[in-house]
Image (spheres, rainbow, N blue to C red):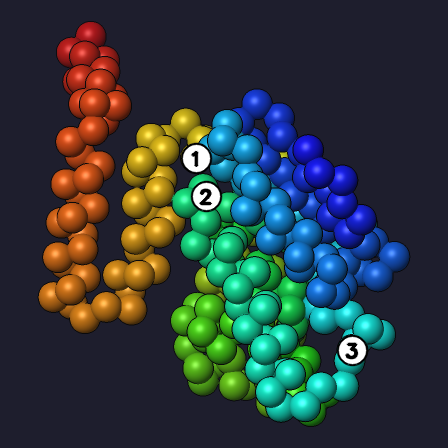
Amino acid sequence: MAEYRYIQFSVEADIGHLQLNRPEKKNAINDALLLEIEDVFINMPEEVSAVLFSGNGPEFCSGLDLSEHVARDPYGVVLHSRMWHRVFGRIANSPIPVVAALHGAVIGGGMELASCAHVRVADETTYFRLPEGRHGIFVGGGASVRVGSILGSSRMMDMMLTGRTYDAVDGERLGLAHYCVEPGTALEKATELAKSIAQNSRLSNYAMVTGLSRIESMSMDDGLFTESLLAGMTQTSSEVQERIQGFLNRKKK
């Protein structure tokens, strides 16, 4: 397994655990960290059935590392933003479900990163913020699409214009997190969920994490057609037939 400078990655049984590992920088994102994340998802071991995402130290991720900001011309900024899109797309479009354990700061690029996960668990220390407006810049890592689809453009606009912060309770209510748990227990809950998800059919997990987001952006007719194709793909597999038969046999007892 590769050695990384800014992240840690380990595999236990069939669960992969990717942890941001810049606690002295509040896990701020630089290009090297992004490329290490990309390397993990490109070279994900075949035995991994679910991935945990977490941050080392008191914060999940404080966003872009402004201390390493490089002045670029407009074309250079576009290319840099597209690199973020590519890497975050590896997570969002991963055929393997990704469960994020959030705590402390989930700010700017940290929100963009968290929104790529398929399931998000926030403990009560978590807070969400988009400070780009205060810095005089615009989001560039996919927030306008991913966070915008969660909150709606109006709420996201308010966050960016005013610097508004949402706590974990509001984050769960608005969909920024799916679960809100006691302080210090996000990773425990995320691990529990990842282990449960890993017991599903790999094929149905693939259909869910790759199909639903695409269906959302389709017309109704195209979405319904795609749903039928995914149903046909999953429901006819030998594994599913065994699972259904096992369920029916348990009900008879």
Disc 3 or disc 2, which is closer to the eye?
A: 3
Amino acid at pointer 2: Pro
The residue lying at 74 percent from left, 65 percent from top is 30
**What's the CA distance linking mark 2 and mark 1?**
8 Å
Q: Residue furthest top?
A: 253
Of the pair 15 and 162, the residue shown nearer to us: 15
Residue 102 lies, with reference to residue 48, above or below; the image says below
In which quarter of the view is residue 169 placed?
bottom right
- Residue 89 versus residue 115: which sits nearer the camera? 89
The amino acid type found where label 1 is placed reads Ile
Q: Is residue 201 above or below residue 146?
A: above
Which numbered disc flags the more N-terminal residue, 1 or 3? 3
Q: Is residue 142 left or right of residue 31?
A: left
- Of labels 1 and 3, the one closer to you: 3
CA distance for labels 1 and 3: 38 Å
Numbered disc 3: secondary structure: loop
Horizontally, residue 39 falls left or right of residue 220, namely right
Which amino acid lies under the numbered mark 3 shown in the image of this protein?
A: His
For residue 21, say whether it is visible.
no
Quarter of the image with the C terminus is top left
Q: Which residue is mark 2?
A: 97
Q: Residues within 10 Å of mark 2 (few under 14, many from 20)?
A: many
Assign a secondary structure to mark 1.
helix
Residue that mark 1 sits on: 197
Q: Which mark is residue 69?
A: 3
